[in-house]
């Protein structure tokens, strides 16, 4: 998610904003950008200049110039994904979402407007009933930001209000990154007498969990480059895994030496799958590059 800082100065690019009336789809890019702006009631003046169209378009009716939000045709959002893909373009631009009462709820920018509308329709169907769309030619970040600011400026100027979804702190319209799982602790504390040997606790841990990564530091803040790379690989593979900080002497006291004896592996990180040691950073990286991890983690 990208947050737009309205306090920084913007330079108006040469760009075009095209408004949507009807659309026939073509190759759909996969990149989608949602933006959580922090609007203010004061905006700098801006303008977007029309640009000569140099590449063919699949949209049947576009106006190659900046149009006001109030002048853009509003398009109903169908319930079916297939119909939705036929109505909205898979291109970058600015879009405004309205509820069933035709009240503006959110103004956003996206690298794939069709994907963004589909996501909103799924997450907040009661608020995503119709949409206005403006496709931006040469959509670099500055051009998209200026298009968004133009529509926001117009709406705030006419109503005196920021759309609810664009208010600071609102999370309804923006996908939040998933919270990372906490690292596991093998003991209740360094000075607590264990009822089982530490090696038995390790054995139980790796056998009861499909994937366990023993790393230096936490998964949110690895303390060595090798551990960071292993965490990155597991995250990119979409693996549900447990992590244990071998440097935590308060709750994992003695783990490093005990684990070396248990696995017969002298270095860290160490990754176990289905109770068996797979290896460390080098082995995991090699398997990841060869595409061998997907089958292993199933």
Image: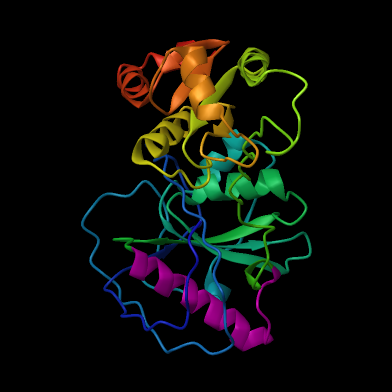
Counting the numbered discs, the total is 0
Q: Residue shown at 67%/29% (left/top)?
A: 186
Q: Is residue 269 left or right of residue 273?
A: left
Stretch of the chain drawn in magenta: 141-164
User: Is 212 above or below relative to 23?
Assistant: above
> x, y (%) of residue 258?
53, 21
* Viewer-proximal residue among 113 and 215: 215
Q: Is residue 18 left or right of residue 164?
A: left
* Viewer-proximal residue among 191 and 123: 191
* Viewer-proximal residue among 158 and 7: 7
Q: Is residue 167 magenta?
A: no
| Colour option used | rainbow
Q: Residue shown at 45%/42% (left/top)?
A: 24
Q: Name the main secondary structure of what is drawn in magenta.
A: helix
Q: Residue shown at 69%/58% (left/top)?
A: 172
Answer yes or no: is residue 160 visible: yes
> x, y (%) of residue 160?
67, 87
The image quadrant where one finds the C terminus is top right
> x, y (%) of residue 59?
41, 50
User: Is 47 above or below relative to 225?
Assistant: below
> x, y (%) of residue 166?
63, 70
Residue 25 quadrant: top left
* Viewer-proximal residue among 105 and 245: 245
Q: Residue shown at 29%/61% (left/top)?
A: 138
Residue 49 quadrant: bottom left
User: Is 190 above or below relative to 173?
Assistant: above
Q: Is residue 155 magenta?
A: yes
Answer yes or no: is residue 297 visible: no
């Amino acid at each position: 998610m990208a947050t737009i800082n309205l306090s920084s100065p913007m330079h108006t690019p040469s760009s075009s904003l095209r408004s949507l009336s009807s659309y026939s789809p073509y190759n759909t890019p996969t990149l989608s950008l949602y933006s959580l702006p922090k609007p203010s009631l004061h905006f700098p003046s801006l303008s977007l200049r029309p640009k000569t169209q140099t590449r063919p378009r699949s949209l049947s009716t576009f106006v190659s110039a900046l149009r006001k939000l109030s002048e853009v045709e509003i398009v109903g959002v169908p319930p079916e994904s297939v119909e939705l893909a036929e109505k909205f373009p898979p291109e970058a631009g600015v879009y405004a979402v309205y509820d069933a009462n035709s009240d503006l709820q959110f103004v956003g920018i996206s690298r794939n407007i069709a994907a963004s509308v589909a996501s909103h329709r799924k997450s907040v169907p009661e608020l995503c009933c119709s949409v206005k769309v403006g496709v931006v030619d040469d959509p670099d970040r500055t051009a998209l930001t200026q298009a968004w600011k133009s529509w926001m400026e117009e709406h705030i100027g006419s109503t005196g209000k920021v759309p609810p979804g664009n208010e600071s702190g609102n999370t309804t319209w923006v996908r939040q990154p998933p919270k990372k799982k906490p690292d596991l602790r093998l003991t209740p504390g360094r000075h607590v007498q264990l009822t089982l040997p530490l090696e038995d606790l390790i054995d139980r841990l790796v056998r009861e969990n499909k994937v366990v990564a023993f790393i230096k530091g936490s998964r949110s803040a690895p303390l060595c480059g090798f551990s960071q790379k292993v965490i990155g690989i597991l995250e990119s593979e979409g693996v549900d895994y447990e992590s244990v900080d071998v440097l935590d002497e308060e709750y994992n006291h003695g783990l490093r030496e005990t684990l070396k004896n248990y696995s017969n592996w002298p270095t860290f990180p160490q990754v176990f799958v289905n109770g068996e040691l797979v290896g460390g950073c080098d082995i995991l990286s090699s398997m990841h590059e060869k595409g061998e991890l997907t089958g292993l983690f199933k």
